[in-house]
Image: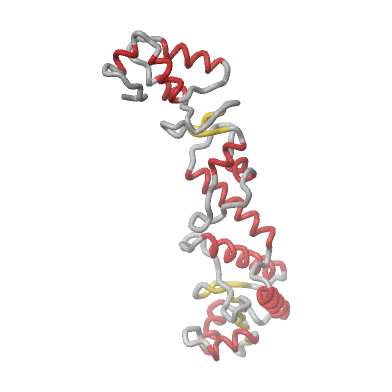
Amino acid sequence: MDVKFNDFARRYADSSRYGPDLHEMAELAFDFGWRGFGMVDDGTGEPLAEWDTHNYYNCDCSEIPTRVNYESALAAFKAAGVDTHSHNGWIVWDAASRAGHEIARKISATLADYPILDDERLSELEWDNAVRMIEDLYRLPDDVTGDDVVREMPEVPYCSNCSSCDVEDAMASLGYSQCMDCSTWIKSLVCSGEHVCYDCADREREGDCECVPNYVDGLRNMGLYPTASDLREIQRGCETCYPVRWPHGGAKLGV
């Protein structure tokens, strides 16, 4: 069978020490039921890589662009009715198709000037990745989503390996800070890194004394949270708690 090749497949067969030669390409075309064998130049002289959801362990910085270019290339070939396959981690196509030659040429020319075939899809995947990363790393309040947090960030932290994730600053702009004892997110008109959540405040109660619970209930009714120093001062002024918590003087919360 006379097998057709595109120019890049021929060049790659002649120049690569590790890729298939023309004879191997012809055999692959026969295996795929094709009358031609084509490869796509990724703009650097290497074959355009496929993206596999099951076998991808690279940094997000390389995974996301690879996925975008892979999806865009497959969509272009599919729209033109050109059959594609994956081989050795590359996209290959039936070079018996005239449309396939033009698609491969356009993809290569585009990538030679700019490394991404679809910026809109890239932004979408980077956003989704950032949301997933934040929701995996942080237990957010019920009324806050990862999308809410990313919107408050100066830039999208799309890569878990290379991007900083300033969740605390973003949450502060949404009116939240973390409890200094358990890291639960708390929301109040007045809130800082010294505030504690109601559960942690309640645990400071000394025996049956009601000084802390009464104080915390009053703040709860106003939508406010106590600070560690607030609780310290309440117990220092309590005839029941003071001698138990600080029998030798001093006033360090939790001692």
> Left or right: where does residue 192 sit relative to residue 2?
left
**Residue 123 in picture, x, y percent from top left:** 65, 56
Asked whether 168 or 83 is in front, the reply is 168
| In this view, 59 is above or below 195 | below
**Residue 111 in picture, x, y percent from top left:** 66, 73
| In this view, 14 is above or below 153 | below
| In this view, 76 is above or below 253 | below
> Left or right: where does residue 4 sit relative to residue 238?
right
Asked whether 205 or 36 is in front, the reply is 205
| In this view, 42 is above or below 64 | below
Q: Which image quarter is the C terminus in? A: top left
Q: Is residue 40 visible?
A: no
Residue sitting at x 54%, y 43%: 167
Residue sitting at x 56%, y 15%: 221
- Displayed quadrant of residue 99: bottom right
> Left or right: where does residue 76 sit relative to residue 233?
right
**Residue 4 in picture, x, y percent from top left:** 64, 87
Residue furthest toward the left?
248
Asked whether 144 or 46 is in front, the reply is 144
Residue sitting at x 57%, y 47%: 131
